Image (cartoon, rainbow, N blue to C red):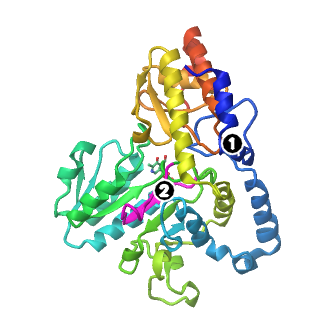
Amino acid sequence: MLSRNDCLDLDARDPLAGRRALFDLPDGVIYLDGNSLGALPRNVRPRLEAAVQGEWGRDLIKSWNTADWINLPARVGAKIASLVGAEPGEVIAADSTSVNLFKLAAGAMKLRPGRKVIVTEPGNFPTDLYILQGLRDLLGDVELRVVEPGALHAALDDGVALLLLTHVHYKTGAVHDMAALTARAHAVGALALWDLSHSAGALAVDLNGCNADLAVGCGYKYLNGGPGAPAFLFIANRLQVDFQTPLTGWMGHAAPFAFSDDYRPAPGVLRGLCGTPSVLGLSALEAALEAFDGVDMAAIRAKSMRLGDLFLDLALERCEGFGLGCSREAASRGSQVALTHEHGYPIMQALIARGVIGDFRAPDVLRFGFTPLYVRHVDVWDAVDILSDIMARGEWRQARFHEVSAVT
Ligand SMILES: Cc1ncc(COP(=O)(O)O)c(C=O)c1O
């Protein structure tokens, strides 16, 4: 088994080690929850100060032009595109992931008239399922076909308009084969929509290499845009001209400042916009994305797999009583691991009290995410050391760790 010194050696040789200094991480904290809320990049604070004081405070409404606020969704989208294998004109940053899911799923149904079926999997992230349920109820005559991953191929037939899947599962970290499933959807004439919330910035996603049609993802996880950061959406170039959004807001209009009465969609992916962009949120996200400048996503993925393996090797060796809630094969996992334990909630609270921040997902999953830009090998070693101490002492049995907060 690797020693703490071995981990320090690995950090010394880590090509991404220098990126950690770009983040403002609190002392005494090992942050293993960047898959839920990314840490604060140091350049976000000055960027927001400039946006608030200079752009908003001093220049007021002129900043839509002088600070180019109006092009933030496309500019930030282009930066995200480079991380997910898309062209700059295929991605915009806007709204929340949930709203973008609605826009793209509804748009997909319009692109496949006559087809009435949407396929997804049970246990998908709740908002993905809820949005599809709402869309079905709105449209009426739509079947939501919810099938286990092993049955997806068989569930795709010529009645299917859309396959919607989350690329990396939020709880287990299981990775779908995007290329194969997209190809299968296309073979029956359906479209594929991928939720990249747990992939963007963590895996070397290749949307165009996989021939993906549509995608969405979060700005506040591995992209580090801050709590409630704007999300993104991708519409493949070949679909843009026919894509119709159900939310025909003025910012997605071809000429918003013509103020005409009739809706006419903007060219390209900009038709995916709805209302006025969230300028402060987009400014923070734009600054945060600089942490990826010059970084090879393959290096990020390689380190993320190494960190996950290291955590599992150490935890399963040193801590008794845990089950495995994820694949043992790094290539089949995203940038997170999951342990299961019937007392998972108080164990996670005890860990957080000792400065190791992961999270808990009901009913029994302890989730640990590894953001390769700022998590070190030695952090993983120390986190498992603390976990094994908590288990050996039964520290989690204390009553205070059993009080359930609103957000877990
Ligand atoms: C797969 C997935 N989709 C969507 C979301 C969240 O969507 P929203 O930002 O709209 O709350 C999450 C949040 O954890 C997620 O894991």
Which amino acid lies under the numbered mark 1 shown in the image of this protein? Ala
Which is nearer the N-term, disc 1 or disc 2?
1
Q: In this view, does 168 lie to the left or right of 119?
A: right
Density class for disc 1 (Cα within 10 Å; few <14, some 14-19, many ≥20) is some
- Whether residue 125 is visible: yes
Q: Quadrant of residue 352?
A: top right
Does residue 103 lie above or below 310 as drawn? below
Q: Which of these two is toward me, 86 or 399? A: 86
Badge 1 element:
helix
Q: In this view, does 108 lie to the left or right of 402?
A: left
Does residue 92 lie above or below 252 as drawn? above
* Segment colored magenta: 203-221
Which amino acid lies under the numbered mark 2 shown in the image of this protein? Gly
Q: Is residue 351 rendered magenta in the image? A: no
| Residue at left offset 40%, top offset 46% | 125
Q: Position of residue 358 (x, y in %)?
A: 57, 32
Q: Position of residue 96 (x, y in %)?
A: 51, 59
Q: Is mark 2 within 8 Å of ligand 1?
A: yes
Q: How many marks?
A: 2
Q: What residue is disc 2 on? A: 217
* Mark sitting on residue 241: none
Residue at mark 1 to residue at mark 2: CA–CA distance: 26 Å
| Residue at left offset 64%, top offset 45% | 373
Q: Is residue 240 left or right of residue 403?
A: left
Does residue 323 lie above or below 93 as drawn? above
Q: What residue is disc 1 on? A: 17
Q: Which of these two is toward me, 148 or 304? A: 304
